[in-house]
Amino acid sequence: ARSGGASRAPSSATVERVLAVQPRAGAGAAARSAASTAARRRYNAGAIDSLYMPARTLDVTGTLCPIPVLLARRAMRALGPGDQLEVVGDDPAMMVDMPVWAEKDGHRLLELAKEPGGQVRCLVEKGRGD
């Protein structure tokens, strides 16, 4: 649990993590492959916890599908293109729902992690649309 204003230490106990799941819009097969390879290198190098700096963190702990996606959509509207939103919750369905929502709404899923204890974290970069 976080206390007000305290910084969150990077988690080294991540069980499942997917980085750079979606390449930039319009990227061809070579760019998608390069993004995937670069993400694997960052993961293997242990640099995953310091790659991204979200503009906002949204805690949806205690909510169930579809509420995490609806709250993330609302929070994303307040951000500008290229800004990042970190969504933290405990609904296992987020592992499926967040990538689908990000792609459908034109955003890019940068990180998706399921940590021990059931905590799910995802980082989404806002696209050019709403």
Image (cartoon, rainbow, N blue to C red):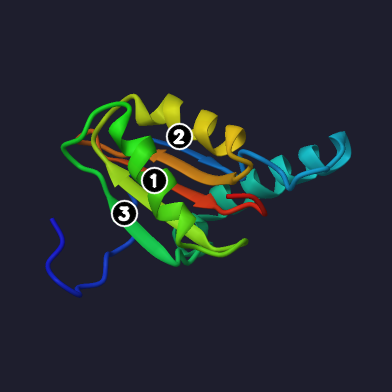
Q: Which residue is mark 3?
A: 58
**Left or right for 64, reference 125:** left
* Disc 2 residue type (three-letter): Met
Q: Residue 117's image quarter?
A: top left
**Marks 3 & 1, CB-CB < 8 Å contact:** yes
Q: Are marks 2 and 1 in contact (CB under 8 Å)?
A: yes
Q: Earlier in the sequence, mark 2 or mark 1?
A: 1
Instruction: Residue 72: give its label.
Output: 1
Q: Earlier in the sequence, mark 3 or mark 1?
A: 3
- Position of residue 84 relative to residue 20, above or below, is below
User: Could you tell me which residue is drawn at 45 percent across and 34 percent down?
Assistant: 98
Amino acid bearing label 3: Leu
Q: Label 1's element? A: helix
Mark 3 → mark 2, Cα distance in angstroms: 13 Å
- Quick one: SS at disc 2? helix
State the residue position of label 2. 98
Query: Residue 66 at x, y = what percent?
Result: 33, 28
C-alpha gap between disc 3 and disc 1: 7 Å
